[in-house]
Amino acid sequence: MMATRNAEAYAAANKTYEWGFSSDIEQEFAPKGLSEDTVRFISAKKGEPQWMLDWRLKAFALWQTMEAPDWSKLNVPPIDYQDAYYYAEPKAKPKLGSLDEVDPEILRVYEKLGIPIGEQKMLAGVVEDPLNEDGTPKRRVAVDAVFDSVSVATTFRKELEAAGVIFRSISEAIKEYPDLVRKWLGKVVPQRDNYFATLNSAVFSDGTFVYIPEGVRCPMELSTYFRINAENTGQFERTLIVADKGSYVSYLEGCTAPMRDENQLHAAVVELVVLDDAEIKYSTVQNWYPGDENGVGGIYNFVTKRALCQGKNSKVSWTQVETGSAITWKYPSCVLAGDGSVGEFYSVAVTNNRQQADTGTKMIHLGKNTRSTIVSKGISAGRSDNTYRGLVRVAPTAEGVRNFTQCDSLLLGDQCGAHTVPYIEVRNPSAQIEHEATTSKISEDQLFYAMSRGLDAEAAVALIVNGFAREVLQQLPMEFAVEAQKLLGISLEGSVG
Amino acid sequence: MAAVMELPSTREESWRWGDPAAIAAAAGLPRGEAPAGAWFLELEGARAVFVDGVLDEGRSDLRHVAIAPLEGGTHVLGARTTGHGWSLRVEAHASAELIQIVHIATGGENHVPAEIVLADGAQASVVETYVGTGWSNRSTRMTLGAGAKLARAVRLLQTAGFVSVRDEADVGAEASLIVTMLGAGDAGTRIDGAITVSGDDAFAEYGGALLARRDQRQECALSVRHAALNGQSKQIWRAVAADTSTASLAARVEVARDAQKTDGVQSLRGLLLKRTATVNLKPELEIFADDVKCAHGATVGELDQRALFYMQSRGIPHAKAQALLTRAFVGDAFAQIADETVRDAFVADADAWLEAAL
């Protein structure tokens, strides 16, 4: 019976990654390989000021002295950092902000990706009625699209500016708001933070910068769409979001890549800074190409994401749905420095075939009465390995800390692995730390019931998995929730027969 | 004067919370007088006394315990014990009398290996007590045949220095292994356990309590590996940290690909008595089989303020209320000790510790 299951799984896997196309867009590359010259090339290409170049060079010098981390439960083949391009830019570079000039090929790519925003119209510059037929305002999302190494389009710029919100590609921000960028860049994830973050600091090519001024509730959701298109190219984007006192923003991030036989590196850094009473909600649907059923190809997703809750009563909520990538190494974290600040981490990680994921969070409690919630749902199928790795640390100064952690794992099939590695380090007795974890499989009863109601096995599994992940999915903004549910189903197709 | 010792570094994952420097310091303590005291429990059976790792024949009554050359294994600390140690071998379906072993250290370092080999259906119980000062390093290899039963209880009561215990066990089909540890001395403590449940329908329980005070560091790094069908395991640990001490528990359940129907339970709970103390927990699961039930719970905090308040409102003084609640907290970890005398001894040790620490 197992053999048939696997056969079905493989058959299904072959049809699953529907974002695997690549587009024939003329690209301009930096010379292959990584050296100080590469760093200078990227910086020059971006027309960066001297301080930025110095910052990058310092990071590059550091990186050369560092070693890749090996503590995770990941089997990472050696990466040849010289055999990749660190910069690729669509040749017909649009003048940013003028959407009409976007290469139609690129627009077609986004069309195929089905960016969830009606941005097809937006990108084409069609003005829509801002109200639905019933008079309620339409939900709108401003998008920054990053294609390989450069940002190609940022929408809704005027409207955001009227609210005082700065939403720019980071290259533009470095030119237009150098003081703001300089003040915060590297404050949360310093250059020497870790191997991949340091590499990113040296060669980051683009990304997003957001500043929400004091007291402003960002009038729409902000979104970045990342796409790796070119061959042999690493993507190193850098995102920096600063929420000033009393502000709020919800930020969405999505990503895809073509199906290719070789592995490509994605080493991003995301820094969030939250001041007094401000809140950032950061949602990710990660759907990089996971490789084929034999583990050939796929993206190495080595990402450093960290939030600094610097202000009193500030809040950061990370929500992630991780379905793609051959290897995921990612721990979105919160440094809860401000008294009363709140960190949340909601995660669904799905691995199938030969995928490997080592993901989780760190909650560093420094301020008084800080609270954190961690809900992690890991789903493993095929021959994959799925690890939750988390740290909850309570500093001696942090009075009245509360943490609740729940890690649930679901195993589909008997060739996969589910692992839980939580670290709890408490140095203040007033802390209340609770951690729960369970591991289970889909029960025959549930399957039988769902199928007796007329669902086929696959639909039944998708239904049950969605139920398993519900606590996390309901944290996602609506646009993403629908996409994420669909993705869960697709990622697991054929894993139970 | 002390020769440079090859000790693990805290950069190694399994020594993340470890204190290798304390081992070197303990080994450097000068030899002195053996502490006086009645360390044996009032129980019939074989007795062995080791002073600085050497059998004191005058105070021992070995009966079926043998002294033999033994291998210490490959573990970084365990390997040092290779040499003469004690061996208990029990024939099929036989029951060994209770064996009590007292390890007295007077300073410096001492290393003793041990083996417990139970043939099919054999039964044994062992109580070990560590007292004195210096670095006491032990490795114990336990092999349980089909249906064998071993209960082992270890009291770590050294007043200074360091005790490191390396346990390896192989639990056969339908066998039962129950190990209970109590760290209630003032020495640094490192417990390293590697338990393999290799037979179907077997049961392994490895738990206990680490009570740390002053600037002590006590830690346990344990893994229970399920390699067969229908296995059950329990890891119930309590850590109490007072003053500037650190108590760390890293417990792992591994379930191999074929170990279906495994039921693994982990309960790690930490209690901080002072704001300067630290508790570290790492309840880890590594699961490769889909039809298993593995759950763990971990909590860290202080005593329940409402319970304290309630007890005070009934006229119980604060310190007494604190002691009662802490005692109840620790007591969970001793529930599996079947022998009443042994269990009472554990509770008494814990009480004595609480009285001194609170």
Image (cartoon, coloured by chain):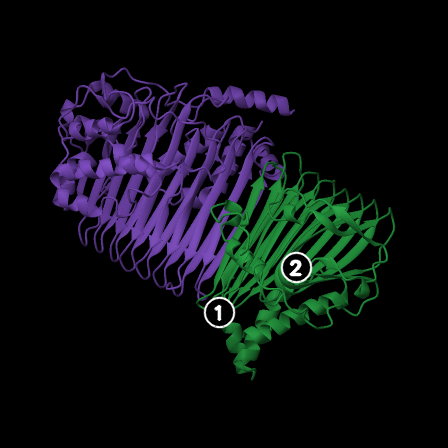
The image shows residue A408 at horizontal and vertical percentages of 52, 45
Whether A34 is drawn above or below B196: the answer is: above
Label 2, on which residue?
Answer: B181
Taking depth in this image into account, of B115 and A184 the one nearest to the observer is B115
Furthest-front residue in view? B1
What chain does mark 1 sit on? Answer: B
Label 1, on which residue?
Answer: B243
Give the residue type that dot 1 points to.
Asp
Label 2 sits on a secondary structure element that is strand
Give the residue type that dot 2 points to.
Met
The image shows residue A244 at horizontal and vertical percentages of 21, 52
Q: Earlier in the sequence, mark 1 or mark 2?
A: 2
Picture quarter with the N terminus of chain A: top right
| Residue A5: quadrant of the picture | top right
Whether A41 is drawn above or below A333: the answer is: above
Q: In the picture, one chain is green; tell me its letter.
A: B
Specify whether residue B16 is in view: yes
Label 1 sits on a secondary structure element that is loop
The crowding category of the residue bearing disc 1, from other C-alpha atoms within 10 Å (few below 14, some 14 to 19, many at least 20), is: some
- The answer to whether mark 1 and mark 2 are in CB contact below 8 A is no
Q: CA distance from mark 1 to mark 2?
A: 22 Å
